[in-house]
Amino acid sequence: MDEQGSQQSLRKGRLGVIGIVFFVVAASAPLVGMTGAVPIAMLAGNGAAAAGTYLLVGLTLLLFSVGFTAMTSKVTNAGAFFAYVGRGMGPKMGVASAFASVVGYVTIQLAIYGFFGGLMAGQMASLGVTLDWWAWALIAWVVVTALSMLSVDVGAKVLGVLILAEVLALFVTGIAILVNNPGGMDFNAAFNPTNIFAGGFAGGAGIAIAFAFASFIGFEATAIYGEESKDPKRSVPRATYWAIGIITALFSIVSLAMVTGMGVATLP
């Protein structure tokens, strides 16, 4: 009975700060954000100021994380937000928040599988491998499910390799564009508060800010791994700050590079 219980319970002390950061950065899906969210933030939002919008949102989430990580030292629970809301506002509100979160995340996950399937179908077709989008989505689902059935540190190692490659590719591409400066770098257009809030919250600025916040989705997952971390009171806060910092720098630099590559004059 004890052996069975130990096999089904969370394994403590398996993750350090770096492992948690890998999980969280992976949840934000930088390549998906760059190909999906950033173009919309630029073209339907505030144009060249998208880079400044990501920086603003990142700083806002850092401030939010001060209070958020303070709760992790009081409540170490894999339910994270559910546990916090339940402790502060009662079990009913906690369950309601958990239900809303599950619906939201499942919907987003299904959309990402479809997005992945569509991109893979087009990419692999150019290499002579022809499969429908749903087949690639199903393959991705099987791989993700298989990894989730293994111990959490195995998933962290696999994600670590993939995320390092993904982040490195984005950073190298972004820096290369900024160094070549084909369209002319314009820091004023990118980071001027007037440009960031152009169009108001009901217009361009609101669209850009919404998609910028969406690009950070999953950053709060650091608290989920508290029970499996080596030192929850230190690992979770550090991982949260590191994850937000990396995502902010990545999206700000690469979106600035995209603006520089296209040229400010070509954007709305």
Image: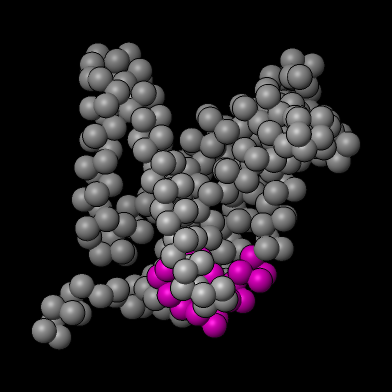
Residue 15 left/right relative to 72: left
Residue 107 image position (x, y, % from top left) = 41, 41
The quarter of the rendered structure image containing the C terminus is top right
208 within the magenta span: no
The quarter of the rendered structure image containing the N terminus is bottom left
Q: In the displayed structure, would residue 33 be above or below residue 63?
A: above
Residue 246 image position (x, y, % from top left) = 59, 53
- In which quadrant of the rendered view does residue 189 lie? top right
Looking at this rendering, what residue extends furthest in the front direction? Answer: 92
Q: In the displayed structure, would residue 146 be above or below residue 11?
A: above
Q: Which residues are magenta?
A: 65-85
- Which residue is depicted at the point 51% across and 67% down? 93
Looking at this rendering, what residue extends furthest in the left direction? Answer: 1
Q: Say if residue 126 shows up in the picture.
A: yes
Residue 40 left/right relative to 97: right
90 or 61: nearer the eye? 90
Residue 157 left/right relative to 183: left
84 within the magenta span: yes
Q: How is the structure coloured here?
A: one colour
Residue 39 image position (x, y, % from top left) = 61, 27
Q: Say if residue 26 shows up in the picture.
A: no
102 or 6: nearer the eye? 102
Residue 100 image position (x, y, % from top left) = 47, 53
89 or 247: nearer the eye? 89
- Which residue is depicted at the point 40% across and 70% down? 78
Q: In the displayed structure, would residue 229 be above or below residue 255?
A: below
Label the magenta part by its dominant secondary structure: helix
